[in-house]
Image (cartoon, rainbow, N blue to C red):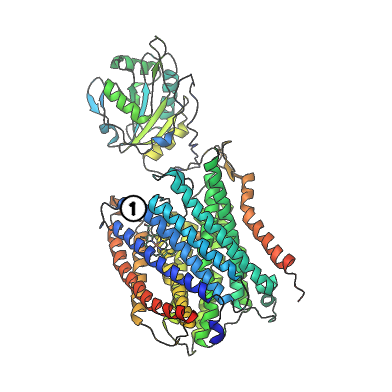
Amino acid sequence: METKSKNIFSSITLWWMLTVIILFIVLAFLGLFMRTEQANLLPGLQEYFYSAMTLHGIGMAGIWYVGSMAGVIYVSAKYISPSKKVQNFSYITSVLGIVVILISVVIGKFAAGWYFLYPLPFKGTWPMWSTVAFLLGITILGVSWLVWNFDYLRAVSEKYKLHHALGWQYISGKEEPVTPPFITITTTSVIACFAALISAVILIIFYFTEIGTEKMNDALLMKNLTFFFGHLIVNLSMYLGVGIVYDVFPEYTGRYWKNNRAVSIAWNFVLLLVLFAYFHHLYMDFAQPVWMQYAGQIASYTSSIPAAIMSIFGTLAIVYKSNIKWNLSSSFMFLGIMGWAIGGIGAVIDSTVAVNTVFHNTLWVPAHFHTYMIAGLVMIIMGYFFHVVLEISESNRNERTSQIILGLYLIGGYGFVMAFYMAGADSIPRRYSSYGWDVISKGPFWAEMGLFFGLLLFLAILLYFIVFFNKWKKAYHTLQ
Amino acid sequence: MITGFTVILMGGVSFCYSQANGTPPPLDEDLFLYKPVPDILIDTGKTKIQLSSLWQERPLLLAYVYAECKGRCSPYLLSFSNAVNTIGGVNRDYNVLILSFDTTDNISRVRAFCRMAGIDRNQKFIIGTTNAVDLKKITNATGFWYKQIGNSNQLDHPVQITGIANGQIRRIITGDEVAAQRLNEAVQILSGYFVRSYPMSSKNILFRCFETDPETGAVKITAGAMIFFVPAMGILVIIFYLFYFKNKKTV
Ligand code: HEM
Ligand SMILES: [Cu+2]
């Protein structure tokens, strides 16, 4: 233990964790607010719906990305040496970016949705300055995270050759040199993430060009750039979280999770194909060449299924007949991997062209991504964060913390997403602040159901926070 | 259902009418879409009816003319009536209202003018006039305008067909030539079907990745699509720099 608690990233990771969990509570509250409105229980507050949705969406996408990345940095200290300065820089600039976005949405009423699809930012009811502020916030985050990712790759490159980091020795049948799966997974993910951030930067440049000159942008090109970025950043947050589990979970099972040929092939597939999966967001854009639509479906399958299968079977295999110590961390991480699979099925269904023609922009979409987030990545990261505070505070890892949190979280979480799935299957559209007409008259009913389970989920999150914060304070004092 | 590949050139509504000095700029359809139309009173000669009675059971296509027009009204009406004949469905899928925008017109003169311009009785078009107050309301709501030319009895005006469904403007077709294809799309939109549309290219656009041919619907990749390669090139450069340039390892 001693050597672990000397992890040079302990302090910054504590701050990252606290920031993420507190923002999570606030953003989850906004989620409940939206569901309450959709249940027609808050007439009169309709005008705040889209600002709430924008903040909730960009906030959630952002915090779980930084949460995973911060977690990755903490784990990586075992193998490589990312720069401490860069960690502080990314933390401070990320917080700054969040503040600027908050100003844009809360004061400026910016409400174009989390991926601010062109030309919506220019067509809204909000003033121009809030669009500019929002884009500025995104710029700050983009630069911050580019530096963060660059530094990570730099640290990998100091220690590993590229083909070793990517596990190609395993693919060609050798066992040496050893590359932990964590390194292979995070290297592939961070490389792809770098591409996503470059795309975000181009996007922002195009936006600012339109603001500064008479030029206009091509909506389809902008949509491509937007989803290249948006799909990747969310997808890769998940993969970073999975990378963490590969490394941390063995500490609970007492078995080492070895890299091997199949694992390496699966994650190289990710690198090769994840860049093309985003095409599935453009199935309804007929002006997109047809071959891209095929490529989108194929890449959606191949960039997710092999990696998911390897991870799920890997997790099961490592747990099976082991003496795993179940506590809040290990159970959250374990169930997170399983939840990822369930949400992933929902996602892959929707990334199938024939299905998408029916499900496009229905509540099925929020259904699947809330599943692999709430029941997947969020569980993984919450479990992992708890693991880290236990580790830094040198608390007993085997303590069994409240089963109530886990129970409430699962019932609340799965119930909440179920209400989205049912509504989606009923063709109820997403992003409606209220459901007025006949065709979607079942909308308020499913919103009420969602709200009910959402409240249970919220309670679980609050209870988690109490337990987590308790250990956090202890960890904080340990470091002083 | 919609068969075949149709492309409406939205933003392309900015065509062609005489840009005399002081003429308002071409109509921007976006500003009118989904806006409600006022429920004006229409005199058809035989009866007086509310405009709403015309869009309540089916969509409505509204065209403006005036009886004394020596200019674009008659060729335009002819083109419109030909397009309607081609697609069919008046009084079944949609109503057509020809409304005079000259308050001095009387209904029989407007009818005579329409006959002369090639519209026959069997076509079941509704022809009507309205009072000055209502005329102002409807023209404002639909973005239509007219202006007396000198001291003559001639009026300068654009030509347009306004598509109305459920009391809202859902499509405005401008231009003297009414293509049956465009009209058909408008009717589809008004009837609640999805019609594909893609903006026309313009010099003002920064980069463009794909072009669609409005005739065939074929999609072509254009130079702007090079943008897609920038992120991929970016990572190649970074990887090369870090792994092969900065940290050349021998082991
Ligand atoms: C914790 C409880 C949560 C609740 C109650 C909640 C609720 C909601 C609701 C009601 C919507 C709007 C759905 C619509 O009609 O389109 C929404 C959208 C969204 N949520 Fe959540 N959510 C929660 C957690 C999360 C998490 C963990 C994420 C993680 C990424 C997330 C990301 C998003 C995103 C990206 C959108 C879409 C925003 C947009 O369309 O621009 N949510 N959420
Ligand atoms: Cu996607």
Q: Give the residue type at disc 1.
A: Tyr
Neighbourhood count class around disc 1 (C-alpha, 10 Å): few under 14, some 14–19, many 20 upward: some
- Residue A341 visible (yes or no): no
- Depth check: give the residue in front, A436 or A426: A436
A61 relative position to A46: left or right: right
- Depth check: give the residue in front, B77 or A146: A146
B174 relative position to B51: left or right: right
A101 relative position to A222: left or right: left
User: Is A380 placed above or below A395 here?
Assistant: above
Residue at screen point 44% across, 22% down = B76
Dividing the picture into quadrants, the one containing residue A401 is: bottom left
Residue receiving disc 1:
A48
Chain of the residue that carries numbered disc 1 in the rendered image: A
User: Is B194 placed above or below A450 here?
Assistant: above
- Depth check: give the residue in front, A210 or A446: A210
- Considering every residue shown, the one lying at the far right of the view is B250
Residue at screen point 34% across, 69% down = A458
| SS type, badge 1 | helix
Residue A387 lies, in percent from the top left, at 47, 80
User: Is A434 placed above or below A462 here?
Assistant: above
Disc 1 under 8 Å from ligand 1? The reply is no
- Residue A219 visible (yes or no): yes
User: Is A223 placed above or below A74 here?
Assistant: above
Residue B121 lies, in percent from the top left, at 33, 22
